[in-house]
Structures are given as structure tokens and as C-alpha cells.
Image (spheres, rainbow, N blue to C red):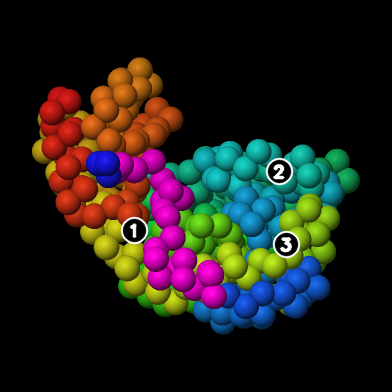
Amino acid sequence: MNKIIDLRSDTVTKPTPEMRSAMMSAEVGDDVYGEDPTVNRLESLAADMLGTEAAIYVSSGTQSNLLGIMSHCQRGDEYIVAQNAHTYRYEGGGAAVLGSIQPQPLDTAEDGTFDLGKVAENIKSDDFHFARTRLLCLENTTGGKVLPLTYIEEAAKLAKPRGLGFHLDGARIFNAAVSLKVDVQEISRHFDSISVCLSKGLGAPIGSVLCGTKELIDRARRQRKMLGGGMRQAGFIAAAGIYALENHINRLEEDHQNARALAEGLSLIKALSIKPDAAKTNMIFVPFGVEESNRLAAFLKEKGILISGRGALRLVTHLDISRQDIQTVIQAFESYF
């Protein structure tokens, strides 16, 4: 059977043989009782790596972000977020539906940032007519782009004197750190809470961790139970997260290099509007109409290549994509055009 080259997302990665071995040999207990030693080890490892007091293991990035927002805000409060942020656009409106927390979305610039002046303007005054602004949320990476450290620092300086919590959807925070060639704490140290996904580029089959202060994580643990997120012998899947954090961070640079090679190859096709330096991490976006995207996706699927997009094709590299796969994809695009 020919290999399927799946560029739809880095969530499609499958556990490596070494990761599967770690999972099968994991020591387990009841995590709801706090007695799963492998989950406890994962939470301690994540907190140490991110430089926080505590962490909690949850089933998904959506749940991790929701717990983060709900741990900062009460019913009737508001969080400021980017218009295209995952927490606002792609998580089912969970903060509003389940937390009664109102989003205040702001437009973003080409580099993934939003105007901090606009943030200041949208912090509500202390008036009972308004929702209370309690939280500022950033995302890093965002659309494959890395937020500058100086921008994060300025956002923290804006939020904290005004009494706002500062949350990071850091699903791909390690991609950002590898791209910037800095320790991840150079990013995480500015935030009160950080959501980190283990099942994207890091290659675990399931799970995210929410990192923050002990007080915040204690609140998140109560809310995780309320949302039905308590897991019992979860050490089997937590072991995959440990393996990912210990073995799959530095190799993210390979994904970034493959994305750059893909962008460079596709930039030579005149029918495509893509720059050779389009890949900042492991994603590139190709502007396309919906109908043309569907035709191209069908053509590539016949050649064993899977892609996806909503108005623009998003091509994502990950640990299951080799440099030879990149060449195969470029050749397939060339044959279509």
C-alpha cells in the first residue's frame, strides 16, 4: 500500500514505536484521586518546563483553553481575543456556552498580532452596564506565525497593571520556541496560564496540559471534573505526553525545514501566489477560491495526498512527513498546474 501524505494538520500524527512502548509500560492509578503516577509525572514535567507552579493534564486543547478562561473569569465577565483565534472561532463557543463568558474579538494584523492600543480601548470601564473585562488571550503560534517576544512583553505590561489575567493558547508554543531559538520559558514566563497541546507536532495521540499557578490549577481541576473531564487510569496516554516532551521538541526544526522546502518548491509554480519564505514554522497557506481548492484537493487525493482549507489551502508538516514526501507533493502540484 502506498503511503498517504497527510498535510491537513499536525494533529494526524501517529505514535512512534518508541512512544507506543512507553505507553504500554506505563505505571497507572486513578487520576481523579490524584493517584496516577504517570499523570503526576507529566504534570510536574510540564510545569517545570514552562516555569509554572503547577499543571493539569486534560483530554484536548479545547478543554485546556476552556479551563484556562473559566479559571480566570466568572459568569458575565469578558475576555479579549483575536478575531481569528482558535479559542474564539474554532472551539464551539465553549467559553460563552459553558462559562457565560463574553468574548471581545479584535482584528489581527498580517503578522498575527493585534493592536495593543485597541486592546486598551476595549477594556470596559467599571460600570454595571458592561461585562467586566478580566482576561487577555494570545495565541502562539498563530496561523503558523510566531509572535515577537517584544510584542508579548508589551502585551503583558498592558494587561497586568489593569488587573487582567493573561492566557496563552500555546498549542504550538514549542514550534514558536524552536523557531525563535529560545528556551520555551522565554515565552511562557509572561503569562498567567498556558495551554500546551501534546497531540500536534509533538506527536502524542491525545491530550494537552494547562500550566499556571497552583491556585489557578486547583480551580481548573474542579472545573475539569464539572465538565466531565476527569480520567481514571490515564497514565497510558500521559506516558505518550512525557515521551513527546522528552524526545520530540528539538525535531520540530525538521518540520520547519520541510515547510520551507515546500514553500520554496511551490513558489516556482506561476499559478500559485506564494512566497519562498512563506513558512515561518510548520505551516504554509496558499490563497485559493473554494471551488478551485476542492478540485485540487480531489486531484491530490487520487495521488495519495490529503490537504484542507477554508478559502486558502493550509499545508502542515509534521513528524510523519519526510523530505521525500515534500518532493512528491511539489511534483503533484506541478502536474496539476
Residue 307 or residue 260, whichever sits in front? 307
Residue visible at 30% across and 20% down? 295
Q: Position of residue 48 (x, y in %)?
A: 56, 82
Tell me which numbered mark, 2 or 3, is placed earlier along the sequence: 2
Can the viewer see residue 11?
A: yes
Q: Is residue 169 above or below residue 89?
A: below
What distance separates the C-alpha of mark 3 from that of mark 1? 28 Å
The reply to whether the C-beta atoms of the residues labelled 2 and 3 are less than 8 Å apart is no
Q: Secondary structure at mark 2?
A: helix
Residue 67 or residue 119, whichever sits in front? 67
- Residue located farthest toward the top when viewing the structure as drawn: 291
Residue visible at 67% across and 53% down? 63
Q: Position of residue 84 (x, y in %)?
A: 52, 41
Tell me which numbered mark, 2 or 1, is placed earlier along the sequence: 2
Location of the C terminus (image quadrant): top left
Question: In the image, is 140 to the left or to the right of 295?
Answer: right
The amino acid type found where label 3 is placed reads Met
Q: Which residue is mark 1?
A: 319
Q: Which residue is mark 2?
A: 94
Q: Position of residue 171 (x, y in %)?
A: 51, 58
Question: Mark 2 against mark 3, which lies toward the viewer?
Answer: 3
The amino acid type found where label 1 is placed reads Leu
Q: Position of residue 274 (x, y in %)?
A: 22, 38
Q: Secondary structure at mark 3?
A: loop
Q: Which residues are magenta?
A: 4-25
Q: Which residue is mark 3?
A: 231
Q: Secondary structure at mark 1?
A: loop
Q: Is residue 125 above or below residue 191?
A: above
